[in-house]
Image: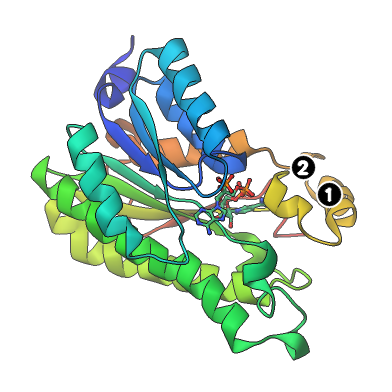
Amino acid sequence: MNTAEAKMQGKTLVVSGATRGIGKAILYKFAQNGVNVAFTYHKNEEEALKIATEVHELYGIKAKPYRLDILEPEQYVELFKQIDTDFERVDCFVSNAIIYGRSVVGGFAPFMRLKPKGLNNIYTATVLAFVVGAQEAAKRMKLVGGGAIVSLSSTGNLVYMPNYAGHGNSKNAVETMVKYAATDLGEFGIRVNAVSGGPIDTDALKAFPDYAEIKQKVAEQSPLKRMGNPTDLAGAVYFLCDPTQSAWVTGQTIVVDGGTTFK
Ligand SMILES: NC(=O)c1ccc[n+]([C@@H]2O[C@H](COP(=O)([O-])OP(=O)(O)OC[C@H]3O[C@@H](n4cnc5c(N)ncnc54)[C@H](OP(=O)(O)O)[C@@H]3O)[C@@H](O)[C@H]2O)c1
């Protein structure tokens, strides 16, 4: 085992929305490196339990799923109390879960069809969920002398994506919130950053009406000539949580977009 692995082994990650896509890839990346994982699901309890059993058997770490609805950010308060009873410490928090479907009606739409309710839902699930989750995590990180917080973001706040105004604006807002959190929490040894992804092949992207078109365009646009995978973002998140790799990185957004944003 190298020193970096040793530094992360026995720590605890809390990650939201880890039953699928990017959250699941993050969970596996940390578990492979000996990190215990408290993770959330929304509806997919069966898959969550399957994942918890699998990573325990494969990597010998502790993994436990909890139900969370990010449209009710205050649920994080109770959730962290449960985590306190199940885990010894909290070292890393990743705000990853995302809403789509009915709750984004009026938020995922062309500009002239945007509605306050849909936009508010996206803001709640993206920014307010990050704020409450990060506050609860930071209280625990202070007890162990520091930690790392990461929010997922997306390059839909840098380049136009059809229907993406609600998400793009909220991702902009969460990146700004990350900088404020980083500034206020630095004195406690807590670093706060964001990872902003270009389009990644997940269920959330499949919910876009123009999914096939986006997929083809991204592969054409990227100098690397392929679509992004969940594991492409998991590495950047792990880097930001590992103090042996990123001890002086805080208040930043790392863009992982396969080079698509420039083109
Ligand atoms: N896909 C992309 O192109 C892309 C690009 C850049 C950044 N991102 C960001 O990466 C993050 C993850 O996206 P993804 O594409 O990996 O999503 P995904 O594969 O669709 O997974 C979404 C996750 O969120 C959970 N979830 C859904 N509704 C929820 C709710 N109301 N409350 C709590 N959890 C809920 C789901 O749980 P259940 O399975 O239990 O329903 C699932 O675990 C998001 O923040 C997204 O903005 C995505």
Which amino acid is tagged 2? Met
Q: Is residue 166 left or right of residue 176?
A: right
Q: Position of residue 86 (x, y in %)?
A: 23, 33
Residue appearing at x 83%, y 55% in the figure:
211
> Does residue 242 appear left or right of residue 224 in this picture?
left
Q: Secondary structure at mark 1?
A: helix
Query: Above or below — where is 64 with respect to 184?
Result: above
Q: Is mark 2 within 8 Å of ligand 1?
A: no
Q: Disc 1 residue type?
A: Lys
**Position in image of residue 97 (x %, y %):** 51, 53
State the mark number for residue 227: 2
Decide which of 54, 175 is in the foreground and name it. 54
State the residue in front, 140 or 1: 140
> Residue 156: horizontal and vertical position, in percent?
66, 66
Disc 1 versus disc 2: distance between alpha carbons? 7 Å
Residue 105 higher or lower than 4, as above or below: below
Rendered image quadrant of residue 175:
bottom left
Query: Few, some or many C-alpha atoms within 10 Å of disc 1 (few <14, some 14-19, many ≥20)?
Result: some
Left-right relation of 227 to 23:
right
Residue 103 in view here = yes
Rendered residue at 68%/53% (across/down) = 204
Asked whether residue 158 appears in the rendered view, the answer is no
Image location (x, y in percent) of residue 226:
80, 39
Q: Quadrant of the C terminus?
A: bottom right
Check the image and name the residue furthest to the top.
1
Which of the marked residues, 1 or 2, is nearer the chain's N terminus?
1
Q: How is the image coloured?
A: rainbow
Residue that numbered label 1 is attached to: 215
